Image (cartoon, grey):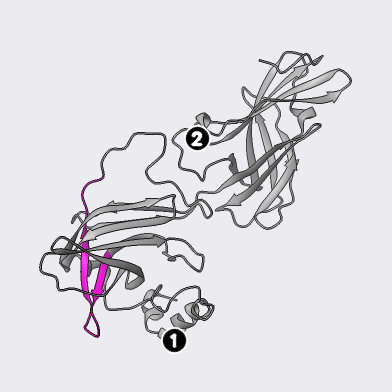
Amino acid sequence: MSPGNRLTQPRLLQAMYGARRRAGLVTDRLVERVTRLRHDSIAGLPPADCDFFAVLDGRTLHVHAVLPAGVEPADRAELFFVREGQTLRCPATLRPEGDRLAVAAVARLGADADEVPLDKGTWSVGLAVAAGAEGERHFSLRVDEAADRDGPTVANPPHPVSGWLYRPGRGGNGLAQLTVTGARARAEVVKLATGRVDARIRARFVGVRPQDAPVVVFTPRGGGTDVIVPVEPAGEQFEFVVPLAELVPDQPGEEVIWEAWVRTSATRMVRLGRFLHDLTDPRTVLRVSRAVLPLHGDQFVGYRPYYTAAGNLAVACLRFTRFTGTPS
């Protein structure tokens, strides 16, 4: 169905969100599609000075703006998102700030019932305020250039569940925009579990649908034969035992490092690792201790899973002929 057809069927749109409202999870105006505003009409609205426009934790948009001088008092406000004839809304709060009105909003982004479900693409962002039964007044959001950022966290991390990316920015007209992109196809590590005799990895697919006979593939750095581990996903999640006996090198004292992948179909491979976080370099934070596990007889393996700078999972395996303590 084209956007034009969708907008001419308000009853269909009401049905899409009716279940949420009946469940009491959102108000009637938390998510509303209207046709009053167009994406290109935002530039013609009077601008509000926006001094904070950021998505924190990958899923929560925070906005603070001051309305132009002379705007009459209002008793309600909303943040709205406009793209290709669609307008989605969420509540905002009003408070006096000197002789002007300030508006603050916290919008959860995503597909859950209490989140604003923005589709992929670039959305213009603005404010609507009203008093009593009076009509709404609409404002664009004028934002400054984002300052350069340096530190242990990235400015725009992915959504921690869906992997989608919500990137706040500034259009060519200096007005606020939010660009939404889908998740990169990956397998996200949920848990690295090491017991007394084996090691397990639990993970889930992100941005991967469907899967066709998926397998985990360990590829040795420097070349060699891959080690294949079949998995049976339960929904989006899967778990497997790390095949230490196949990953450990033949010679005592020798170490091999394996890159971890998941082959989701005959023609597609995705990385296995930790990607849904806000860390600049996960190697310095997501650290895993080396474990020593038995193989057979007096044979042991030093098992050391770790994450690369890109978040990819790698596994180092070192063979021992006798256990004399944790290897250095």
Q: Residues within 10 Å of mark 1 (few under 14, many from 20)?
A: few
Residue drawn 65% across the image and 42% down it = 191
Q: Which mark is residue 243?
A: none
Q: Which residue sits furthest right?
A: 297
Classify 327 as above or below 48: above
Q: Is residue 276 visible?
A: yes
- Amino acid type at circle 1 is Arg
Left/right placement of residue 190 relative to residue 103 reads: right
Q: CA distance from mark 1 to mark 2?
A: 46 Å
Start-end of magenta stretch: 126-146
In the picture, the quarter occupied by the N terminus is bottom left
Secondary structure under tag 2 reads loop
Where residue 239 appears, as percent x and y from the top left, is 72, 46
Q: Which residue is more in the foreground, 159 or 131?
A: 131
Residue drawn 38% across the image and 74% down it = 3
Where residue 22 appears, as percent x and y from the top left, is 52, 81
Secondary structure under tag 1 reads helix
Q: Residues within 10 Å of mark 2 (few under 14, many from 20)?
A: some
Q: Which residue is mark 2?
A: 310
Q: Is residue 80 visible?
A: no
How many callouts does the rendering have? 2
Where residue 318 appears, as percent x and y from the top left, is 71, 20
Classify 175 as above or below 273: below
Classify 190 as above or below 288: below
Sequence order check: which comes first, mark 1 or mark 2? 1
Q: Which residue is mark 1?
A: 11
Q: Which residue is more in the foreground, 304 or 12?
A: 304
Where residue 231 appears, as percent x and y from the top left, is 74, 47
